[in-house]
Image: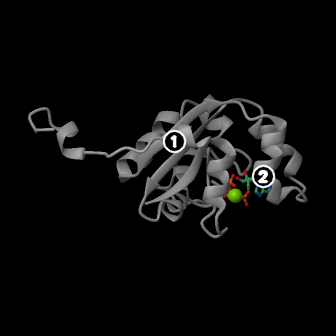
Amino acid sequence: DERTFVMVKPDGVQRGLIGEVVSRLEGRGLKLVGAKFMRIDQDLAEEHYGEHADKPFFEDLVGFITAAPVFAMVWEGADATRQVRRMMGATDPAEAQPGTIRGDLGLDLGQNVIHGSDHEDEGANEREIALFFDDEELVNWDQSTEGWVYESAEF
Ligand code: GTP
Ligand code: MG
């Protein structure tokens, strides 16, 4: 299945929304294959957001993403990149539909809680995964739902 890079941004971490974001992705049926709590340094921030280097908001964006820890993750599932983007909602939380992560949890364009690889940017998911994670930090595992949901079920 496809893998995608997702991150709870500094505002989400500070506001205690890591669990909420993880919960929504788990609930959807996506499989977590990697996660780490980390601080993004200046170099990583400039590389991650390199596509916006010429934009007037670039300095603010880099300043924001390096200002506090983030929770970086890799999620796997059918059409994972596009499905996570759909769950995130529009870039500006003020325009994002209620029911989406940004539409439910944010109000400000510059502090929009979550990042997910862009499905319209071919290969962005694989590039971002490689930027944030070493291969050995990703876990290949079979998720057996039945046996772990009901105590009486057989494993
Ligand atoms: P990311 O998941 O963070 O990449 O968001 P996105 O893919 O939905 O949006 P995009 O890549 O176009 O922009 C990256 C980030 O820059 C956004 O998440 C916003 O926080 C910020 N941003 C985008 N456009 C503007 C803008 O016009 N002004 C400001 N201040 N910030 C912006
Ligand atoms: Mg983007």
Residue with the mark numbered 1: 138
The residue sitting at 62% across, 41% down in the picture is 133
- What x and y, as percent, mark residue 61? 80, 46
User: Residue 143 at x, y = what percent?
Assistant: 31, 45
Is disc 1's CB within 8 Å of ligand 1? Answer: no
Q: Amino acid at mark 2?
A: Tyr
Whether residue 96 is situated above or below residue 41 in the rendered picture: below
| Label disc, if present, on residue 49 of the rendered structure | 2
Q: What amino acid is labelled 1 in the image? A: Leu
The verdict on label 2 being within 8 Å of ligand 1 is yes
Q: Mark 2 and mark 1: span between their CA atoms?
A: 23 Å
Residue 21, visible in the rendered structure: no
Mark 2 neighbour class, 10 Å CA radius: few under 14, some 14 to 19, many 20 or more: few
Is 70 located above or below residue 93 in the figure?
A: above
Q: Considering the image in quadrants, where does the C terminus appear?
A: top left
Q: Are marks 2 and 1 in contact (CB under 8 Å)?
A: no
Q: Nearer the viewer, residue 155 or 56?
A: 155
Which image quadrant is residue 125 in?
Answer: bottom right
> How many numbered discs, if any?
2
